[in-house]
Amino acid sequence: MTILTPKCFTIEEYHRLAKLGFLTEDDRVELIRGEIIQMAAKGTAHINCCRNLLKQLPILLVGIAELQCQDPIVLPSNSEPEPDFAILRIRHDNYRDALPNSSDVLFVIEIADSTLKKDKEVKTSLYAEAGISDYWIFNLVDNHLEAYSEPYQNLLGRFGYALKRIILPNQTVALPGFPDLLLDLSKVFL
């Protein structure tokens, strides 16, 4: 019996597939650890949470950080995820010359309902390995924000975050790296 292993792609090969027309903008996929992964369809709760964050985050971040919504970031380990939000350093080229990489990312946000397991297991490890200091999951299943910080690698080589905080939907939370900027979660979890 022959065991088939999936083809792992480099970021360059992934981009080439798009350039050749094998992947289009309509394909909801992302590259995770060399594998092209189908992204889940967004439900109403996900769309609503995203819309609410799009109202709140730009007000808080204007002039101090770039806000990117559902666009790719380039990470080590042949990964190009498309987080719901990436809060980025302001760059002089405005990311015109290259996609943001892990050194550009201040923190990442995922909105999770049907993708909660993937966002907690796969994405947490992926973002921690990339050295992204803070990772938030708007957990729509349990109706709270999970704020992860302090990435680490354990003795077995696995990556994760040392700290996990639960912030309830009636609370406010400071944006990572911006202690004076408070996000009112009651305006997000509507």
Image (tube, grey):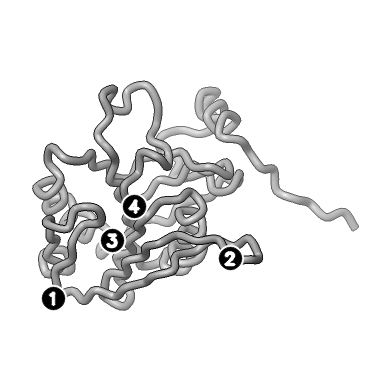
Counting from the top left corner in percent of width and height, residue 27 is at 45, 40
Q: Which residue is mark 2?
A: 154
Residue 108: give its label.
4
Q: From mark 2 to mark 3, how far is it between C-alphas?
A: 32 Å
Between marks 1 and 3 in the image, the one whose residue lies nearer the viewer: 1
Residue sitting at x 34%, y 52%: 108
Quadrant assignment, res 163: bottom left
Q: Dot 4, crowdedness within 10 Å: few (<14), some or many (≥20)?
A: many
Q: Residue at x 23, y 39 (%)?
A: 66
Which one is in front in this view, the residue at disc 2 or the one at disc 3?
Answer: 2
Q: Which is more N-terminal, label 3 or label 1?
A: 3
| Nearer to us in this view, 159 or 32 | 159
Q: CA distance from mark 1 to mark 3?
A: 18 Å
Q: What SS does tag 3 mark?
A: helix
Task: Name which residue type carries label 3.
Answer: His
Residue 102, image x, y percentages = 42, 42
Residue at left 55%, top 61%?
A: 153
